[in-house]
Image (spheres, helix red, strand yellow):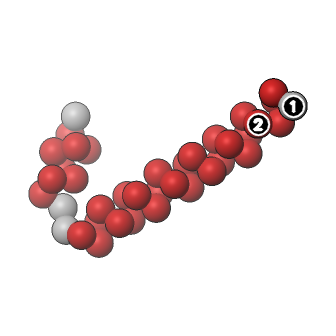
Amino acid sequence: MVSVRRAWNSSGEEVAMRRISYAVLLGVLMVVVTPNFV
């Protein structure tokens, strides 16, 4: 896992940006997946 190793060496700002990007991806997945179950 190169991304994990890079996260350990990254600065706080990069970690925050990565968390935001993951939050956005989760939001998109929720929007895409939820209507399929409703």
Q: Which class describes the residues within 10 Å of circle 1: few (<14), some (14-19), or many (20+)?
A: few
Considering every residue shown, the one lying at the far left of the view is: 9
Which quadrant holds the C terminus? Answer: top right
Which quadrant holds the N terminus? Answer: top left
Side of 16 where 32 appears, left or right:
right
Residue 15 falls in image quadrant: bottom left
The number of callouts visible is 2
Tell whether label 2 touches label 1 (CB within 8 Å): yes
Residue 13 falls in image quadrant: bottom left
* Amino acid type at mark 1: Val
Residue at 40% of width from left, 58% of height from top? 19
Considering every residue shown, the one lying at the far bottom of the view is: 13
Residue identified by numbered label 2: 34
Residue identified by numbered label 1: 38
Task: Point out residue 21 in the picture as x, y percentages from the top left corner.
Answer: 47, 57
Q: Is residue 28 above or below residue 37?
A: below
Disc 1/disc 2 C-alpha distance (Å)? 6 Å
Label 2 secondary element: helix
Residue at 65% of width from left, 48% of height from top? 28
Task: Point out residue 14 in the picture as x, y percentages from the top left corner.
Answer: 29, 66
Residue 24 falls in image quadrant: bottom right
Task: Point out residue 30 in the picture as x, y percentages from the top left corner.
Answer: 68, 42
Task: Point out residue 27 in the picture as x, y percentages from the top left corner.
Answer: 63, 50
Q: Is residue 1 above or below residue 17?
A: above
Side of 15 where 32 appears, left or right:
right
Side of 9 where 26 appears, left or right:
right
* Amino acid type at mark 2: Thr
Residue at 47% of width from left, 51% of height from top? 22
